[in-house]
Each structure stands twice: as structure tokens, then as C-alpha cells.
Amino acid sequence: MTRRQRATIFFVTLCVLLVAAAISLNIGWVLINARRVTPLVLGVVLFALIIAGLIVYTVFLVLEIRRNEQHDSFINAVTHELKTPLASIRLYLETLQSREVDEAQRQAFYRIMLADAERLHHTVDQVLRAGAVGQRRKVTVKAPVDIGRLTRECVDLALVRHHLSADAIAFESQDGSPLTVEGDAEALRTVIANLLDNAVKYSTAPVRVEVAVRAPAPNAVWVRVRDRGVGIPRTQLKRIFNRFYRVQARGLKHVKGTGLGLYLVRSIARAHGGRVFAQSEGEGQGATFTLELPRGAGS
């Protein structure tokens, strides 16, 4: 049990005891002033306000404790996400500086360092975007975006980034005219890329992810990402889109991240007038994420 968990239990227990004491005093006040209407009413109202204040204060305090714990977890995760690739890049640079290596090995070192640099860029970009979407509620600049084409590009990039075979991510798009939405192409790219990265990270070997772009209604477009990975406990389905929140389940200690990916997905979807929701039958049953966006005029 962590220090913050003990603090939470302490304050909740203290609140229960204080509320019980206030209720007991209130009952005593009622018995003493049973025939005096004015003191009786004033006492009951005052004790009700005290009890309500104790409960509100305790709830606020517990939420702050949990928020601080999430912030600490976020800082630890970001520190790891920054330090690990930096240490790797430094190691390879020192190796190149200290001794001669053949051209094939040199090119391999360059590829690894570029991959580590891309990982650093991705982490920093996530943090910066999380700060930006928290201040901007709506998309200010909109343009037509072919969501099927954009999703196909994100799938191709995910295959390269995660070193997957071509059949690891199956892509399916609705035949016919392009499915167009009005929005920020780069922001929507971030949404789909995060959903794909999560699907790959939380998959069990071999990776098998299904991506589908559909128009379930004349005025809506869906991008659905389904994996066969570790799944999500049903009690956590509504919390996974909160900032800094990471799924708590068995076998996930090896999965690293900042807890910002799904928060960005939800924030950007809302800014485009859409929504995102998750489905899972529980741990070990995989998960399905659906991005729903309003369909653009003329598509």
C-alpha cells in the first residue's frame, strides 16, 4: 500500500467519524429542542451544512490526492520516455567516436538513433499537443479531409514505425465516393496514429489489428480500430480517456507511455464535433475503439 493510498484511507475514515459525530450531535440537539421550533430548525440546518461541508471537503481532498498521484506517474513516465532514447543515442554516438566500425554497422547505428530521435519527438509532441488541446475547445481552421486516405497513410506509417509485417494491420474502407470530414488534417492524423499505436502496444504476439472506415449514417463517419490484445477491464472503460490515466491490468508493466494518447484522441474528436468510445469484454478479450466524426458536406 502506497503512502497516498494510506492518506486516502485516513481522510475518508476521518470524514466518516466526523459525519457520525455531527449526526449524533444533531440527534441530541433535536431531542433537547423538540418543543422549540426556531432553535430546532436552525440547528438542523446548521448541522446539515456542516455535514455537507465535511463530505465535499473530503471528496475534494481525495480527488486532489489521486490527481497528484497521476501527475507523479506522468512525470515518471515522461522521464523514462525521454531518458531511455537519449541514453541509447549517446551510447551509439560514443561508440562511433571511440572506435572504427564498418559501414554496415554504422548504417545500423544511424537507423537506431533515428528511431530513438523519432521516439523523443513523439513524446514531446504528445505533451505539447496535450497542453494545446486543453486551451482550445474548437477547431479554428477547417478543410476537407479524406478520412479513408488519411487512415490508410497512418496504417502504412504504423507498420514501418513498429516494424510489422504487411498483414499485421488489416485495413478496410467503404467502397464508393471518398468519406470526407471537415477539420484539421494533422490533428486527425494524431488521433488515428494514437489509436493505432495503442492497438499495437497492447496487442499480444502476433500483432493482429483490424482498421475499418465506414459511414454508418448519412451524416457520420466511423474509424474503427480493433485489436486482440490484453483488453480493458469494464470498470475502466470510461476512465481511459482521462488525462494521465493508464489502464490498470495484469501483464501491462512492460507497456510504457505518458497517459496522454487517449486524452488527446477524445479532446481532438470533441473539437471536431465528434466523439470516441471504447468497447472491451474484459481482460484478455481485446479492445475496439471507434472514432465518430460528422461527415462533410458533399461527401
Image: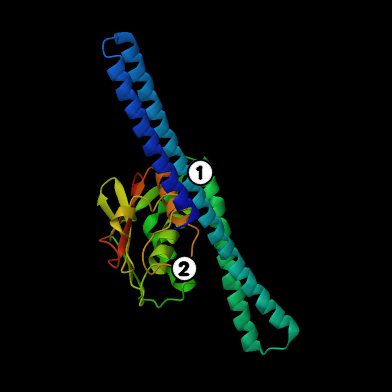
Indicate the position of residue 179 as horizontal and vertical percent values: 34, 54
Left or right of residue 262: residue 116: right
Picture layout, residue 88 above or below residue 222:
below
Left or right of residue 123: residue 98: right
Write the residue at 62% across / 88% down.
Answer: 104
Indicate the position of residue 279 as horizontal and vertical percent values: 28, 57
Picture layout, residue 265 above or below residue 101:
above
The colour mode here is rainbow
Q: Which is nearer the eye, 35 or 131? A: 35
Indicate the position of residue 167 as horizontal and vertical percent values: 35, 76
Near mark 1 (Cα within 10 A), the count class, few <14, some 14-19 or many ≥20, is few
Query: Is label 1 in a helix, a strand or a loop?
Result: helix
Closer to the chain start, of discs 2 and 1, is: 1
Q: Quadrant of residue 289?
A: bottom left
Identify the disc placed on residue 157: 2
Query: Is label 2 in a helix, a strand or a loop?
Result: helix
The amino acid beneath tag 2 is Leu
CB under 8 Å between callouts 2 and 1? no
For disc 1, the marked residue is 134
Write the residue at 46% across / 72% down.
Answer: 162
Left or right of residue 123: residue 33: left
The amino acid beneath tag 1 is Gly
Q: Which is nearer the eye, 132 or 54? A: 54
Picture layout, residue 227 above or below residue 264:
below
Q: How many marks?
A: 2
Report the Cα–Cα distance between label 2 and label 1. Answer: 27 Å
